[in-house]
Image (cartoon, coloured by chain):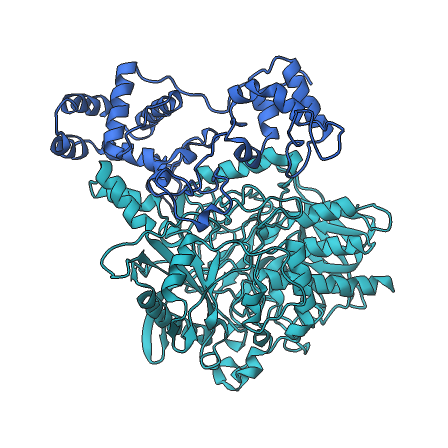
Chain colours: A blue, B cyan
Amino acid sequence: MANVTYYDNIKPLFSQYDRVMMIGRFDLFNYQDVKQWANKLYLSLQPSGEPGGWSKLEGTHVMPKIPGPWPQEWVDIFKQWIDGGCLEGTPPFTVPAPPDANTLKLFISLSEVLTGFSDLGATPDQQELAGIYYNRLLTESDSGNTMPQMLNAWSTISTQANPEAEIATQIIGTFALSKDLIILWYNTTTNKKPATRPGVTPLDYSYYGTPDFNQFQEGLVWKATGSHPTAYAPENSPFYWRLQPEEDGKYSGQWIFTR
Amino acid sequence: MANQQYDAVIVGAGITGAMMAYKLVDAGYNVLVLDAGDHVPNVAPQHPVKQDNINKLFAAGIKDPSAPWPSSQYAPRPTSPGVSNDHTSIVGWKNNETADGNYMIQTGDSAFGSTYERMVGGTTKHWLGTCLRFLPDDFKVVSKYKLNTRADMAGAIDWPIAYSDIEPYYSQAEWEIGVSGDPAVDEAMGATHSKPYPMVPIPQSYLDQQLGGRVNGKQINGIALNVVSTAQGRNSKQYDNRPACMGNSSCVPICPINAKYDAQVHIEKAQKLSGQPGKGKLTVSWRSVAYQVTTAADDSINGVKYKTWAPGGVISAEQTATGRIYVIATHAIEAPKLLLNSPWKNGKTVANSSDLVGRNLMDHICLVVWGNFLTEDGKDLQNIYPFRGPLSTSGIEGFRNDPNQRSKTAAFRIEVGNDGWTWPTSAPQSDLVDLVKQNMWGTALRTQLARQVQSQIRFALEMETISCDQTKNSTVRLSNIKDAMGIPRPVVNYVLPQYTLDGYAYAMDVANQLFAAAGIESHTTVDKNGSGALTFTSGGKQITIEYRGAGHLIGTHRMGDQSTNSVVNKELQAWDHNNLYLVGCGVFPTTATSNPTLTAAALALSAADTIAARLKT
């Protein structure tokens, strides 16, 4: 096979179950992670020939354990990908250009104040997500182009010692976009409407954006309620739901033990 | 394929068709399975397809049971009443055959609230997985409680089989599906086990435990409230090469890791057996829409006519599948649709000398009630942390066979939900939007959201229905309007009998008492414009309710002991055609209170044995 790439040929070989089982070490849905671990993954896919189900990677069973080893042709494709230089291919989702650094910083600090989450820009991944949300609000919610004014108002208010009253009147009470911003961070939805057709009434805030990027899984609504996104519970504490969630998120369904 | 004669032709690759195919191939017979819909395989080589389905769910605005699954205009399926086909919008559900989502045209005063999938695996693709056995009394409810002496229950019949007849097949079905459960729960209600469940129960949720701490041992009208674990087709350990449940909390509509059984498991098992020494051959033909069953001069069935489709819109010429035995395994809507489209003789359609094909459509209508769990002193909300774990892990089962009540009204079971108010209100996202619309923001918003969501609890009281003269006009008929394959679309006119409605009124009283006993502040509302809104009189009082569908498509070709009052006999063989078997929940003469799939599977396994014995001769 010519030009084996991660997005076309390799990522489809992994299931959400595979991803969740390994996510404490690396993310099989992330190109950089799989590239970095490619050689070890390749060894783990092949039986050592010794009894006991061991792979060629020392101390590791043949992967995946469930539903069982890959067919040989899959292992061969993985080998071809490594031999071809671990090409990335075209991601299904193109991250839009973020705003300038100052604007992004303002957007993140406003988002933190409005959502009640104080760490929305702590990592490069989170900053990338903030840039995506900034762009989504511009294209899906802000037909009145009020984002610059809202950030401008926030820029002035944010320097004050106790800005609560000003936020309530000059942000929440003034810019409808501020509510869309909160809903986007929590529910990952906007009020963008599908194409209208006769006899059909679109719902409020039902537009989830791009599933390929799995924005649904980033919703703050789950973190705020000690739970996890529907259909995505990477926690591997057995039967976690029988226990009360803890302060650090353990037993919420998305607490990941990092090995 | 068209010219080959099979031992058995099975229409429908849902749980009953798939299990029968597996059993017959195992017994050495050659089987053709036709399925109208697409094929989304479960196991390794097709992971990307499955991930597409998960992504489709993530992106869907309205996450109804059909949200992740494919739908083609050539094998259309209904969405939940009022939901557009693309899951973004609301559409009118009544008498509205042009709106998308309304493939199943509805003409009743209130909606049939349940839906189905048309694809390999059938509706087990989106089922919850609850695997309750019927209770022994359920098979003889009509005679035991003298319901046949009531004027409003004329035409009601017992099952032609007893619990002891089906018991070995319950065990077989539980081991085929992979059920996690506690036999002691069943045996306390008289449903004895000849074999234990293959797996220990799925642990009860924290929410179940808190509720049980409040109500266990208390009584309502003499019935003990005990929050007991529910038997479910979901792995509590690695089983059948599928992993243990990890609590993705999305059993309906999709288990992302295949810890929940779906019928594709048996299609794949049968494929593996196919052609092995001593085994039969399996041919599975998906995108193959059966639309007519044909008869020979001696009234035996001599073919199933079908057409195939491809995504680009290529429809094949008419083809005919022939076999010695024919099985219709397409559930309570599509089975009558197929039969009513099949002319027989004397102006009758196939299998319909009783005129009961397409009649007695039933469901377990659900009284859904919801509220916030309160602290012991009732002064504050208490967190019980929903939205974690399988959507339901427990029930309160005492009302399923209350001897003092069942002669008067329908019985019910109480399902305890782990999914907060998702079903009735689309929580937790709707809670967030409501709070933001009230100008809340920041830590106050986050704190309030956590408070009101983490104390959410929801119950579904699932009502029994018994087919009788009052349900004869609860029908599936053919429309003059045709789908893209040129096949008439189904028209559903859903009618509920008084016995069920009286049970609903009684269940409302029980729900109020349950909330008082548990310390739950009700937030239950009734939308008088909802698809399940219905006004009726019970006990001299006029009541308006809003019921919801349980997803249980039951009736329309019921079984019985006489050809005049039923469509199939106790072996699921059509009275009118000796080589035609109709399987699935459509054969149930009463719904009982159990989710129906396990019983449908057990009956199908039994029918497979019957058919295998016949094929031998």
Question: Horizontally, is B375 left or right of A259 in the view?
Answer: left
Q: Residue B35 placed where, x, y %?
A: 67, 49
Residue drawn 67% across the image and 47% down it: B240
* Left or right of residue B221: residue A27: right
In the rendered image, the vertical position of residue A205 relative to residue B574, given as above or below: above
Give the x, y percent position of residue B195: 67, 64
- In this view of the protein, which residue sits in the foreground, B224 or B514? B224
Please, is residue A214 above or below residue B514 in the view? above
Image quadrant containing the N terminus of chain B: top right
Determine whether, in the image, residue B179 is placed left or right of residue A49. Answer: left
Viewer-side residue, A190 vs A188: A188
Q: Is residue B437 above or below residue B524?
A: above
Describe residue B592's horizontal placement relative to residue B96 as left or right.
Answer: right
Q: Quadrant of residue B211?
A: bottom left
Residue A140 on image: x %, y %: 33, 29
Q: Tell me where residue B212 sits by quadrant.
A: bottom left
- Name the one closer to the observer, B383 or A220: B383
Find residue B179 and report its horizontal and vertical position in percent.
Answer: 60, 56
Q: Report whether residue A59 is seen.
A: yes
